[in-house]
Image (tube, grey):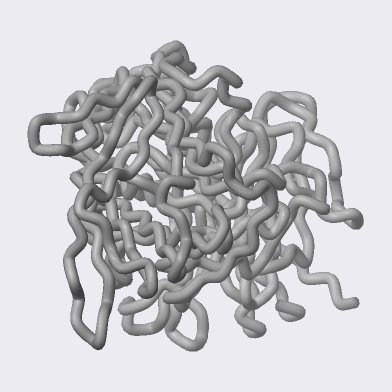
Amino acid sequence: MTRNCIYVNGILLLLIVQVTASFAQRQPGFDFVENKGQWDDSIHYKAQLPAGKVHISDGGFAYFYASAEDLHHINDLMETGQSVDSEMVRLHNYQVNYVGANEQLSYSTTEARTHYINYFYGEDQSKWRGHVGLYGKVIQHQVYEGIDVAIYSKGKSLKYDFMLAPGADPALIRLQFEGVNPVLTTEGHLKITTSVNEITEQAPYAYQVINGNEVAVSCHFQLNNNQVTFALPDGYDPQYPLVIDPELVFTTFSGGGDFANGYFSYCTTYDKEGCLYAAGVPLWGLWPYPPEWPTTPGSFQEEYTTIYGPMVCINKYNPTGSALVYSTYYGGSGPNDLPHAMIVNDDNELILAGSTGSFNLPITEDAFDSDKSGGTDIFIAHFTEDGSDLIGATYVGGNIGNSINGIDMFSTFGLNNQNKTSPIELALDDAG
C-alpha cells in the first residue's frame, strides 16, 4: 500500500464561527439515528431535541435535557476568553416506560435521510461505525398485542402514535413516568416540569378511518400515581384500526433558546468535485458518548467539560451547499480534541490535522505513534472517500505539550496572554 506523506507547516488562521442553523437545507423535523453498535445495545435510536435528546428502547423513552440558562452563561464566558473548566451545567433525565409491554420488539423506519453519520470514538475499533442511517420516523411493532407505536416529529414537536389493529385493547397501554411528576391541566394536557425545562403533552387526538373517512374518537389522558392511560368514554368501532395521537411540545426552557446547532468552526476545505468540508466543535448538542448518567432518573449536575468536552465534527456538503452528504464524529474521552487544518487528496480522501488531550484517540494499527505523550499532542487522521473508515491515524508528539494551536478554543474574540497560537497548513507530496 502506498503511504502518503503529510507535511505540517506553520500557517493557519483560526476561524471560529457560531452557526445557528445548518449550512445545508435539512428535511424538517427531528432525525432519528440508528444504533449500529456505537452505543449501548439497549438503545435502538436517538434523536436530538431542543437542548436535549431522547433515547428509544424496547421499554419506552428516556429524555435528557440541559439548562439553557447555564449554557447561555458558559457561552458568555467563552466569548470573553474565560475558563469554563469548573462551570456546572444542570441536567435532568426522565423516563417514560411501557408497563406490561412485550420485552423484545421489532423495528421499521421510513423517511430515510440522504446523509449519514460516521462515528470514530476511542481506541476500540469494534465501536467504530460508518454509514449510520438517519430517519424521519421509527415504528415499534407489537409493543402490546396488536399495538404498534410510530415515533416521528411535527416541526419542533415530538409525536408518538399508538396504532391499534382491529380488536386490539387500548386498556393495555400504560405509561409510567420516572424522574418527573406530570400533572393534568384543565385543558386535558399533560404538563411535565423538570428542573431545567417544561414540556407539554397535548391532549390526545384519536381517530379511525372508516370507509375512507377520518372519524374522530373522544379520548383523554388518565393519570394515577405517575402512570398515564387513555380513556375512550364514547367507545369506538373495534372492527377498524384506531390511532391515538399525543404530541410533545417543548414549551419553555430556563433561559430560552435552542442550542442544538451551536458550533465553533475551525477549518474548511474542498475537493475536486467542489464539495465543501467544514470541521469544528459542536457547542450545545449533547455528545454522542456522554458519561454514564445516574441510574435514578431526576435532576443532577455535571461539569461542562465532562459532558461537552470538545470532539471533532466534520460535515461534508454537496457542491451547491444544498445537502449534507455526511457527518463524522472523531475523538476520544478528551479533553479538547480540536481540528485545525484539512486537505483532500486527488482520490477525494480527507486528511485532518488537529490537537488532542485524549489518551484513547481512534488510532490505526500501523500508526507512526500509537500513544499520546505530552499534555497535548498533534494528531493526523486520514479518512476514506465516504468518510466511513480510517485509512490511517496517528499521534505526533513528545513528552511535553505539542498542540498545533494552543489557543483557548472558547476564546472567540481577540487574544489574551493565556492564548498561544501556532497556526498550520497541510501540504501533500507527489504520492498524494
98 or 56: which is nearer to us? 98
Instruction: Give x and y (percent) for residue 321.
Output: 33, 77
Instruction: Give x and y (percent) for residue 77.
Output: 29, 21
192 or 63: which is nearer to us? 192
- The answer to whether one can see residue 268 in this image is no
Give the residue at x 41% y 64%. 163
Query: Which image quarter is the N terminus in?
Result: bottom right
- Corner quadrant of residue 229: top left
Give the residue at x 15% y 38%. 188
300 or 291: which is nearer to us? 300
The tally of labels here is 0
Instruction: Give x and y (percent) for residue 193.
Output: 26, 24
Query: Which image quarter is the C terminus in?
Result: bottom right
Residue 336 versus residue 158 in the image, above or below: above
- The answer to whether one can see residue 129 in this image is yes
Instruction: Give x and y (percent) for residue 2.
Output: 86, 77
- Corner quadrant of residue 92: top left
Give the residue at x 69% y 57%. 381
Give the residue at x 71% y 47%. 41
424 or 318: which is nearer to us? 318
Residue 303 versus residue 426 in the image, above or below: above
Q: Residue furthest left?
A: 186
Residue 221 appears left or right of 360: left
